[in-house]
Amino acid sequence: MLLIRLGWISVGVGLLSTHPMICIAEVRPAIFTDVVQSEIKQIARQTTVRIFTDSASGSGVIVRRQGQIYTLLTSWHVVGFTNQLTIMTFDGTKHLPLTQNSVQVGKVDMAVVQFRSAKPYRIAAIHPQPVTPGELVHTAGFPMYSQDQITTTFDQGIRGFRFTQGVVSLLLLKSLYQGYRLGYTNNISLGMSGGPIFNQQGLLVGINGRVKNRDPDFGVYTFDDGTSPKPELLNQMVHSSWGIPITTYLQFISRK
């Protein structure tokens, strides 16, 4: 477990809302030092995997090892609708899943996949507590397209790795559809779904899943109970990337 002194990081946060169903942070400029970024980027690079399907790619993060069996988390929409998966670890090695039938985490957009390897791969340490608005976070994954948004990055393999910084902008106590509750300012791209979200201590706090600026008319910002956010909240939602808190996974495995 990597521990980083909080004194290395500076962030200003003002709480704007204490609504019982939502926490919103007024996000002010955060200062990321080179030391913090390099340490966490190393963790992210070594624990993040790239997942290839028959026609697309996504990301994932290794969270457990049992002998030669590794368990990773990813998004259900990355692996749940295909029976052709290849997992690429940070060393460029390709692995086949133990079974092509991935396990969905409850009814949310999160999945568990396993593969076998005799190689020792790093495991992402999980933070068991919820994040807080204004907390600094780092995201990682493999964008599926180059900057032109036309050319795929499939042939780049692990060289397509991307690492971004930001802060928690919204924390919903009432979930959006498919379990999304964690909003953050980091820029993520198509293909980074399933990749990790780390806090400033290098601990796993969530899984990427939705990019910013989605069309509200498609219902991606509708709460799980079918209700819609008020206009001022919707505006903040649209300008946030979205992930599923790692506590959702912890609750799932505690019931098994």
Image (tube, grey):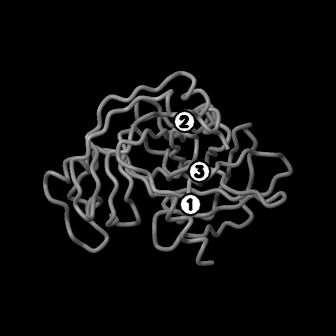
Residue at 36% in and 42% down? 134
Tell me, yes or no, whether the two marked residues, 2 and 1, touch with CB atoms within 8 Å: no
Residue 255 appears at what percent x and percent y? 59, 78
Q: Nearer the viewer, mark 2 or mark 1?
A: 1
Q: Residues within 10 Å of mark 2 (few under 14, many from 20)?
A: many
Vertical position of residue 232 compared to residue 34: above or below: below
Category of crowding for the residue at label 1, using alpha-carbon neighbours closer than 10 angstroms: few (below 14), some (14–19), many (at least 20)? many
Q: Identify the element where label 2 is drawn.
A: loop
The numbered mark at residue 60 is 3
Indicate which label's residue lies in the foreground, 3 or 2.
3
Q: Position of residue 148 (x, y in %)?
A: 40, 29
Disc 2/disc 1 C-alpha distance (Å):
18 Å
Q: Amino acid at mark 2?
A: Thr
Q: Earlier in the sequence, mark 2 or mark 1?
A: 1
Residue placed most toward the observer, 86 or 31: 31
Q: Quadrant of residue 184?
A: top left
Between the residue at mark 3 and the residue at mark 1, the CA separation in whole angstroms equals 10 Å
Looking at the image, residue 26 sits to the left or right of residue 126; the answer is: left
Of the 4 image quadrants, the one containing the N terminus is: top right
Identified by mark 1, the residue type is Val
Looking at the picture, how far across and down is residue 95, in whole percent?
74, 51
Residue 201 relative to residue 19: left or right: right
Mark 3 or mark 1: name the one nearer the start of the chain. 3
* Mark drawn on residue 8: none
Q: Mark 1 = which residue?
A: 79
Task: Tell me what residue is drawn at x 39 percent, y 50 percent.
Answer: 132
How many badges with numbers are in the image? 3
Q: Which residue is mark 2?
A: 153
